[in-house]
Structure formats: C-alpha cells, structure tokens
Amino acid sequence: MQAIRVEEFGGPDVLRVREIENPSPGRDEVLVEIRAVGVNPVDTYIRAGARGGSLPFTPGMDGAGLIAAVGEEVTEWKVGDRVFTCRSITGTYAEYALCHKDQVQPLPEKISFEQGAGLFVPYGTAYAALVLRGYARPGETVLVHGGSGGVGTATIQFAAARGCTVIATAGTERGLQLVREQGAHYAFSHNDPNYLKSIMDLTGGVHLVIEMLANVNLQRDIELLRPRGRIVVVGSRGTIEIDPRSLMSKNGTVTGMTLLEISDEERSEIYAAIGAGLKAEILAPIVGRSFPLSEAAAAHSAILEPGSYGKIVLLP
Ligand code: NAP
C-alpha cells in the first residue's frame, strides 16, 4: 500500500510517499481502508520532532473509511462497516491503517468520509475543553477564541447545542461568516485592534474562554473574564507573561487540556457525546480543503497558515 513516511524529523518536505507492506490485524485489531485523512496541527509538531518518538513512522491520528479485515477475537465490527478512527496503531496517512478495535467508532451514512476524518481530534478536544475541563453550562457566555479552524468550529457546534451564548473569533471575513453559520451568536475578528473592547462592551465579561492561541491571548482572556470565570488552554505556540493579580482579583481559573492524556472514562464520554451529536444532527464537520495523500507536505504547510476554514483532509 501507499503511505506517507517520516524517515527523519524536519519540515513538511520530510513527508515522503512510500510503498510499504499492508498491515494485518492481530486478535483484537481491525484494518481500516482509509478513504480520507484528517490533518491536525499536532501532526506537524510530531513530524518536526517536537514530541520525540522513534523513526520511521506513518503520521496521523484521524481518518475515516471502511473496515477491511478484523482480528479473530473482534465481534464488534465486520468487513464493510463505515468507521472513523480515534488514533491508530500504524498511522492514518496511508491507504490502510491498523487500529485497536476500541480506536474506531461508527460513521453514520449521512456523514461523508471527508467529514469523518475531522471527528476525533477536533470534536474530542472541543468536548473535553468545553465540558470536561470547562464545565460549560446552558445560559453561560462562552468565547471560542479561534473559532474558524477544526477545533473552533467543533466547539461552537457543541456550545450552541448546549444552550450557551457563543462568541467566536476568526481572522478573515470568510472565517467570520463560517463561525456564524456554525452557531456563534456574535463574531469578531481577532485582527481588529478593538475587538476585545467590543466583546467586553457586549458581554460585561464572559463565563468561559476556550483558547486556541494562549501565548498571544492569555492575559487578554483574563481581562475578559467575569468573576469566577474559567479559561481552558487548548492551543499555545510559545510563552507569555501574565499578571497573576488580574486572575486573582476575579477568582478566575486557568486550566490546561490535552486530548492525548484523557482517561478511559473520559474517552467513553467523548465517544458517546460525538455519537449522540451526529445522530441528532447538531454536529457536522466542515471540510475546507482537500489534497491528494501524495501532497501531505502542502497540507502541512497550509494548516499552519492564517485564514482557517474548518478542516484540511488528505484523500488516498
Ligand atoms: P486550525 O484548524 O489550524 O485553527 C487555528 C485557529 O486559531 C483558527 O481559528 C485561527 O483563526 C485561530 N487563530 C489564529 N490567530 C489567532 C489569534 N490571534 N487569536 C485567536 N485565535 C487565532 O487548528 P485546530 O485544529 O483548530 O487547533 C487549534 C489549536 O489547538 C492548535 O494550536 C492545535 O495544536 C491545538 N490543539 C490542541 C489539542 C489539545 O489536546 N490540547 C487538540 C487539538 C488541537 P484564523 O485562521 O481565522 O485567523
């Protein structure tokens, strides 16, 4: 099969197309024929070597496709089932990926493979940030600080369905239109020098911030909080100096969140929340761009550029 391989850490160019042997499932594993691959920012950090790990490897946690083979102890899945992956054993940037039987979830007919490739990391992160760490309650005002990308659009959909008043930011007109379409009640450009004042004038302070770029925004988020407000740090690409007193004076809370360290119970809750949301049609991933699998390097460059619009996917 064809797969993207990383044989040395580095820039996007280290993503090379290689012909490798098809994996075959062990007793409690399934083989997924990948029809679409979800590209996440974390894939670029891992490719660059920022997370360590051994070489060579096939990148990718998110994908969607059909069960192609099952191990002898697998009774939950059969050949031909539509699924999306929730991480994998061998990596999803390939024509086939080996998964533990618990690393796949059913993909409803009305959700395309491209959309399915944008489910686990974005929606799992959104749910974990909003509910498991952020304790978002109906009626609260939630700022999705960076609403136009994969995690942002997912967070807006979950928060709006939960009965929160949703304020979302984006960097382009197209992104602002997108966040409104996903359920944001108010949209502001994070490139407008006055947008923080506009959010404060509108709300008098927000209950919860879901933050995609904390190294830029954390101090501003603290200033936007109402008393006892919470900030959940989802994304950060550097360091920042903050004034702890501004947090203290509001009885505010800053919490970190990483999907890579969730517990088994949290994983089950995430699976249930995504499954129910897809069934109720309150969740629908937005696919902004697709590239052939062989152009994974271009997709890695694109995902770090401004002007996000939902997900970027690869098509094997
Ligand atoms: P993405 O699709 O590339 O979206 C990035 C988002 O950040 C876009 O909405 C972008 O808006 C926005 N942004 C850019 N400049 C901003 C600013 N100054 N203030 C606020 N937002 C700004 O990425 P993603 O998949 O949604 O992931 C978002 C972040 O979360 C990434 O850093 C990723 O590594 C991280 N993440 C963390 C976890 C975890 O477990 N903690 C899981 C998944 C992702 P425009 O492009 O419209 O300007």
Image (cartoon, helix red, strand yellow):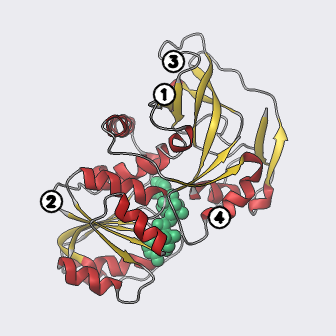
Labels 2 and 1 touching (C-beta < 8 A): no
Q: Using the image, tell me which numbered label, if any, was put on residue 102.
A: 1
Amino acid type, label 2: Gly
Labels 4 and 3 touching (C-beta < 8 A): no
Question: Which numbered disc, 4 or 1, marks the residue closer to the eye?
Answer: 4
Res. 288 visible in picture: yes
Image quarter hosting the N terminus: top right
Circle 4 residue: 302
Mark sitting earlier along the chain (2/3): 3
Q: Could you tell whether 278 is left or right of 6 in the image? A: left
Point out residue 63 in the picture as x, y percentages from the top left corner. Answer: 58, 39
Question: Which numbered disc, 2 or 1, marks the residue closer to the eye?
Answer: 2
Circle 2 residue: 139
Labels 2 and 3 touching (C-beta < 8 A): no
Quarter where residue 228 is shown: bottom left
Distance from mark 2 CB to nearest ligand 1 atom below 8 Å: no
Labels 4 and 1 touching (C-beta < 8 A): no
- The front one of 49 and 296 is 296
Q: CA distance from mark 4 to mark 2?
A: 36 Å
Q: CA distance from mark 2 to mark 1?
A: 35 Å
Q: CA distance from mark 2 to mark 3?
A: 40 Å
Mark sitting earlier along the chain (1/3): 3
Quarter where residue 80 is shown: top right
Image quarter hosting the C terminus: top right
Q: CA distance from mark 4 to mark 3?
A: 35 Å
Mark sitting earlier along the chain (4/2): 2
Secondary element at image label 3 = loop
Res. 213 visible in picture: no
Amino acid type, label 1: Asp
Amino acid type, label 3: Trp
